[in-house]
Amino acid sequence: MTALNRVPSLMARAGTASALTIAAVGGSIAVPGVASEAAAASPATKALQVAASKKGSPYKWGATGPSRFDCSGLTLYSFKKAGKKLPRTAAQQYNKTRHISAKSRKAGDLVFFHSGSNVYHVGIYAGSGKIWHAPKTGDVVRLQKIWTKSVWYGRVS
């Protein structure tokens, strides 16, 4: 039985007036045994939310959080909070992910910046050609448009 199928029976048990009151004040009806939207989120979605929550945190080379980050420190921290383990550096993270095409990318995938075969930067894809990342010394964690075509994509499994 789906959550939507359970709502009418819950409303009947709670009483129509109670359900209408909840709806009128913008509340929600908790359905036992059904995961909330947040709980049902994938690790990639959770990691993306964690990275976004660190907006404005200062860049610090070698830092892995919780208040300062370098690029791979932000991705490591975000995925750790989402229950996934990543290695420390951008290059190691690239080698650990399942490589995907730009066409296949989804929010929560990792975006690796490279020069030739050298991976030098990583961020978390946010959709619409943008990433959450910790750019460089003197900067802060922020959402930014991908600025080059020299990127590869990886999915954390």
Image (cartoon, rainbow, N blue to C red):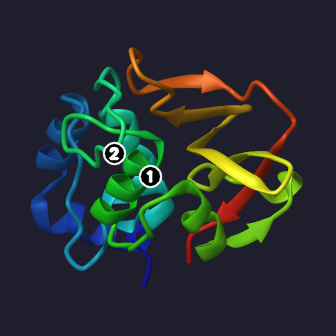
- Residue linked to disc 2: 62
How far separated are the C-alphas under marks 1 and 2? 12 Å
Q: Seen from this angle, which residue lies furthest top?
A: 138
- Relative horizontal placement of residue 27, taking residue 54 as reference (left or right): left
The numbered dot on residue 75 is 1
Q: Seen from this angle, which residue lies furthest bottom?
A: 1
* Depth order, front residue of 106/119: 119
Q: Secondary structure at mark 2?
A: loop
Residue pictured at 44% horizontal, 69% vertical: 87
Image quarter in which the N terminus is found: bottom left
* Depth order, front residue of 143/29: 143
From this view, report whether residue 14 is shown above or below residue 142: below
Q: Secondary structure at mark 1?
A: helix
Residue pictured at 31% horizontal, 70% vertical: 35
The numbered mark, 1 or 2, whose residue comes first in the sequence reads 2
Q: Position of residue 135 (x, y in %)?
A: 51, 27
Question: Which amino acid, mark 1?
Answer: Thr
Q: Position of residue 73 (x, y in %)?
A: 37, 49
Residue 113, image quadrant: top right
Residue pictured at 49% horizontal, 58% vertical: 89
From this view, report whether residue 50 is shown above or below residue 24: below
